[in-house]
């Protein structure tokens, strides 16, 4: 550490690593908290062995359940995005390295995933790893597909978490805003998924249903204000963010209504048809949140530009003309 002789409070330091690493681990664990508040107990389909799977499930750090696959995916992705935003704020005060945060997110997610899958295998009766139990799992194609599907969701979620962290830590506000906008549609699943444990989907209070519906639109609108429109190329980020807000929730609704139920049944060929059946109505219903986000973005950006304008300069005396010209430049 080399200090600046002109100012003893300024030091030329290398980017700090431990704050970023702790931010990655901490953000990952904090984002998992909504699932833990429900008890964190695994509940898997009981159609394979009703006697073995009844009762209270084991604790798991991650909600491994294909019936509610998007809360799992949202938990992983938002962990990376939140960690990236924390590192971005830390870098305003002092240099902070990004790669330790990425390692923190990755290690925390891998550790929690390993524990969750061990708990799930124990729930299915294959935790002992005996040849008889493993052979039974391989013979049961549905059970094997269930586990492979969960592994695929976790792997994709971990990769998107790293991508979200990378975008959120870029110096340009456009990349940070893009990371927030792409993750915003997942907030509903992140919050609403664990709440299903307490109330059914039809039993949501009206105010809570309204919050879950409009919260992503508000987040995207504020991210648009953060992004700004100058240079004008940032309008591309606006288009991508608004398109994600429109398409992603519709896709989530369609897939949630089909894959989570039908993939465990005996007619997987109906999945594409069922997804298309639910996707179009959900797409039509998603227009209003996009309009709200656009209005927030336009109004907020206009106010930001007005506030950011420099006030009109007072008349300059002839003798001060040179100084005034220098200040304008």
Image (tube, rainbow, N blue to C red):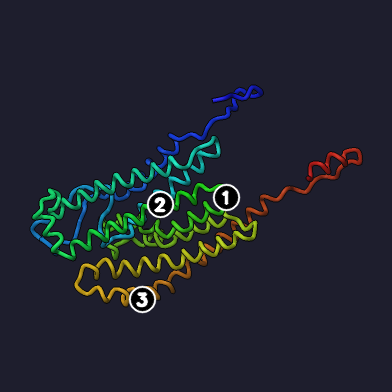
Residue 207 lies, in percent from the top left, at 38, 59
Residue furthest out toward the right: 318
- Whole-angstrom CA distance, mark 2 to mark 3, is 28 Å
Read off the residue under disc 2: 161
Q: Is residue 161 above or below residue 213?
A: above
Badge 1: residue crowd in 10 Å (few <14, some 14–19, many ≥20)? few
**Residue 37 visible, this orientation:** no
Relative to 154, 120 lies left or right: left
Q: Earlier in the sequence, mark 3 or mark 1?
A: 1
Task: Point out the image quarter for the C terminus.
Answer: top right
Depth check, front residue: 284 or 128 = 128
Residue at the disc numbered 1:
172
Q: In this figure, which residue is indicated by the disc labeled 3?
A: 276
Q: Give 229 or 104, whichever is nearer the viewer.
A: 104
Q: Nearer the viewer, residue 16 or 289?
A: 16
Query: Which residue is drawn at the image coordinates 43% and 45% (left, top)?
Result: 83
Indicate the secondary structure of the residue bearing disc 2: helix
Vertically, is 108 above or below 245?
Answer: above
Give x and y (percent) for residue 193: 31, 57
Image-quadrant location for residue 224: bottom right
Q: Is residue 93 visible?
A: yes
Nearest to the eye among marks 2 and 3: give it: 2
Q: Quick check: 74 left or right of 174?
A: left
User: Compared with residue 144, is residue 173 higher up or lower down, i.e. above or below?
Assistant: above
Rendering coords of residue 268 (x, y %): 25, 73
Graded by Cα atoms within 10 Å as few (under 14), some (14 to 19) or many (20 or more), the crowding at tag 3 reads some
């Amino acid at each position: 550490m080399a200090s600046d002789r002109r100012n003893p409070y300024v030091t030329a330091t290398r980017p700090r690593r431990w704050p970023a690493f702790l931010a990655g681990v901490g953000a990952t664990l904090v984002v998992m908290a909504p699932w833990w508040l429900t008890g964190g107990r695994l509940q898997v389909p009981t159609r394979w062995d009703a006697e073995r799977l009844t009762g209270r499930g084991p604790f798991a750090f991650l909600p491994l359940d294909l019936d509610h696959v998007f809360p799992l995916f949202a938990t992983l992705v938002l962990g990376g995005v939140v960690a990236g935003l924390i590192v971005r704020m830390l870098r305003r005060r002092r240099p902070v390295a990004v790669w330790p945060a990425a390692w923190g997110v990755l290690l925390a997610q891998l550790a929690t995933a390993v524990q969750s899958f061990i708990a799930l295998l124990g729930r299915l009766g294959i935790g002992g790893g005996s040849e008889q139990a493993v052979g039974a799992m391989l013979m049961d194609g549905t059970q094997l597909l269930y586990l492979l599907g969960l592994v695929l969701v976790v792997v994709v979620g971990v990769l998107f978490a790293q991508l979200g962290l990378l975008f959120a830590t870029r110096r340009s506000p456009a990349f940070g805003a893009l990371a927030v906008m792409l993750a915003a549609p997942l907030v509903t699943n992140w919050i609403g998924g664990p709440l299903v444990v307490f109330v059914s989907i039809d039993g949501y209070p009206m105010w809570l249903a309204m919050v879950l519906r409009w919260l992503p639109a508000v987040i995207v609108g504020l991210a648009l204000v953060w992004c700004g429109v100058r240079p004008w190329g940032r309008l591309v980020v606006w288009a991508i963010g608004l398109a994600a807000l429109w398409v992603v929730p519709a896709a989530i609704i369609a897939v949630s209504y089909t894959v989570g139920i039908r993939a465990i049944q005996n007619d997987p060929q109906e999945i594409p048809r069922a997804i298309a059946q639910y996707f179009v109505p959900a797409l039509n219903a998603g227009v209003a949140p996009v309009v709200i986000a656009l209005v927030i973005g336009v109004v907020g950006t206009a106010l930001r530009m007005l506030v950011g304008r420099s006030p009109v300069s007072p008349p300059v005396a002839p003798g001060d003309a040179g100084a005034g010209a220098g200040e304008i430049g």
